[in-house]
Amino acid sequence: MSNVPVELKYAKTHEWTRENDDGSVTVGISDSAQDQLGDMVFIELPEVGQTVDAAEACAVVESVKAASDVYAPLGGEIVEVNEALADSPETVNEDAFGEGWLFRMQPADIAEMAPLMDADAYETFLASEAH
Amino acid sequence: MPFIPHSETDIREMLAAIGADDVEALFDEIPANLRMGELSGVPEGLIEQDIARLMMERAEADGRPLCFMGAGSYDHHIPAAVWEITTRGEFYSAYTPYQAEASQGTLQLIYEFQTMMTQLTGLDVSNASLYDGASGLAEAILMAVRANRKSKSRRILIPTTVHPDYRKTSHTIVHNQNIELVDVPYCSEGGNMVPDSLKHYEGEDITAVVIQHPNFFGILEDVDALTDWAHQQGALVIAVANPVSMALLKPPGAWGATGADIACGEGQPLGVPMMGGGPYFGYMCCKKEYVRQMPGRIVGRTVDRDERVGYTLTLQAREQHIRRSKATSNICTNQGLLVTAATIHMALLGAEGLKRVAQACHANTRKLVAALTASECVEPVFNRPYFHEAVLRLSLPLDNVMRPLHAHNILPGYALTKDYPELGDALLVCATEKRSDEDIASYASHLQRIINSQTAAGCPVKPKMA
């Protein structure tokens, strides 16, 4: 079983979100997602200042096997991206929930977090997807 | 073994398995008015003897004119070995080499092609080819829109000195994708795009600037100033360049302070016969930072687990078999056979040989311009340096001169009257390394005789400026 931190919220498209003290939200892909994609070779990140809608494709993670879109779990403005991933995309494989974060956004409406899954629900979701 | 994979029995079994009555039923969801129906106008098949005769007759209809026409397709000498080697069984396919384990020879050849193209353009990476120069520019524009993420305008500045066919093709391919191609006029004295004409766009959001060098008129553009201006505006620079010219001129990767970002163009001058217009192939190179936005196949070199060198397709996550609808294009290596010829052509000539070809073309075109403008009725239109083409204006109707020259089996050049009516009776001429002094003298003397016969007392329209 992959580890699923309880303090995060999850989307069905396998992004995780963390609410920060300043009201911003950090976004990454789950450990399960990185495991399925395999060794990362390139991460295409959004532009700082870019406004995105919930469920809009705003980043691409490319592994040796596939390239997948990353969807914004909620709408808002991108305020920071993880520049370090340009030189070391493998960080997403090594620490998907920590150093491998993709971008930080200022949500337009924090209520959009509500439909996201908690850790338990996400684990159940992962188990159902495995079948 | 036949190459038709499905027998009638196979087809019946497959239809039964999915519960369809016939193959036609599989297309039910396509509305009838969108279906092609029967192809009309396709004649009955011919036996080999008949088709060979027909093709021979068509080829002979071309004749063997003395060619002073360029305008995008050039009559270069192709060493006999080029197509002798290209058509060997081992190379004789245009098919995409997916299977690295079965295609090392072809993959190595494409890798060498890419290496040669990066050396010619002075850029970091090359793809394995595109369809032709015109669609290559359209692909470069689409790529620039993807790559220039700071720009939101999707506006491309494209001088009217870019090949008219390239501009039309680009327009066709990009205009439904909300990309705006903005024409930039050329200087009537120089025939080039002057940096001053761009002042108007200063401070605006421009996604990319296209620079063809030498441009359609053969004129050298002020590439350093134009490139630097574009970069100051946050625009990418797309170079369109004749590969032979790059052996002599500053390559796109060295334009301005930081070089052009993407280079593309027509590969025909590298070992592909003129062949009545095609098939040709396009090339594309770019800076490494943009490689993931590049269309087309890319071959890479690697080592296997025993540390032996091997070649394989790489960066395939850009491509349609992985990225599906979001792929950077649907280009494969359709033009692989022509790329094979180009690689062998460049290998036989070498860097020095290609440079000498370029020098000979330039020298011959200078001789041609001198010989033709010796007539009082012919004058050069532009005053800027040119590579191997030049625009000449006649002081009598172009048609009256071209028809008799055709009758003497001379292709006098490309008439610019349709694409550039403002230039009057203007002709774009070219003399490659194949044109001898005798060829040039023959053209000049026929031209003078025709002019004399039509203008009893010399130039009828206006005296030539001193």
Image (spheres, rainbow, N blue to C red):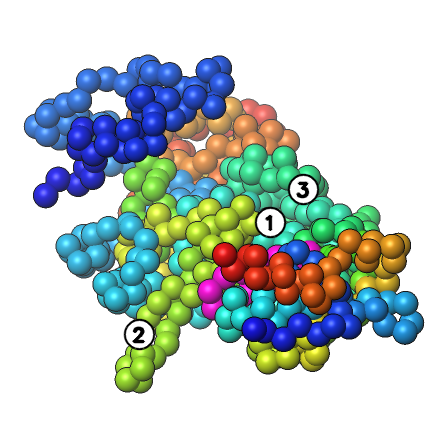
Q: Residues within 10 Å of mark 3 (few under 14, many from 20)?
A: some
Q: Residue at x 43, y 21 (%)?
A: B28
Q: Quick one: SS at disc 3?
A: loop
Percent coordinates x, y for residue B52 in the rendering:
13, 30
* Placement of the N terminus of chain B among the 4 image quadrants: top left
> Does residue B184 belong to the magenta stretch?
no
Q: Is residue B402 above or below residue B139?
A: above
Tell me where residue B400 sits by quadrant: top left
Q: Quick one: SS at disc 2?
A: strand
Cβ atoms under marks 1 and 3 closer than 8 Å = yes
Q: Which comes sooner in the sequence, label 2 or label 1?
A: 1
* Placement of the C terminus of chain B among the 4 image quadrants: top right
Name the residue beneath numbered marker 2: B310
Query: Does residue B362 appear left or right of residue B12 in this picture?
Result: right
Q: Which comes sooner in the sequence, label 1 or label 3?
A: 1
Q: Residues within 10 Å of mark 1 (few under 14, many from 20)?
A: many
Residue A3, visible in the rendered structure:
yes
Parent chain of label 2:
B
Q: Residues within 10 Å of mark 2 (few under 14, many from 20)?
A: some
Judging depth in this view, the residue of B423 and B353 nearest the camera is: B353
Q: Is residue B211 above or below residue A29?
A: above
How far is disc 2 from disc 1 in space, using C-alphas?
33 Å
Percent coordinates x, y for residue B8 in the rendering:
18, 28
Judging depth in this view, the residue of A50 and B72 nearest the camera is: A50
Instruction: Name the mark on residue B141.
Output: 1
Query: Does residue A84 appear left or right of residue B122 in this picture?
Result: right
Name the residue beneath numbered marker 3: B179
Write down the region rendered in magenta. Answer: A61-71
Between marks 3 and 2 in the image, the one whose residue lies nearer the viewer: 2
Residue B76, visible in the rendered structure:
no
How far is disc 1 from disc 3 in space, using C-alphas?
9 Å
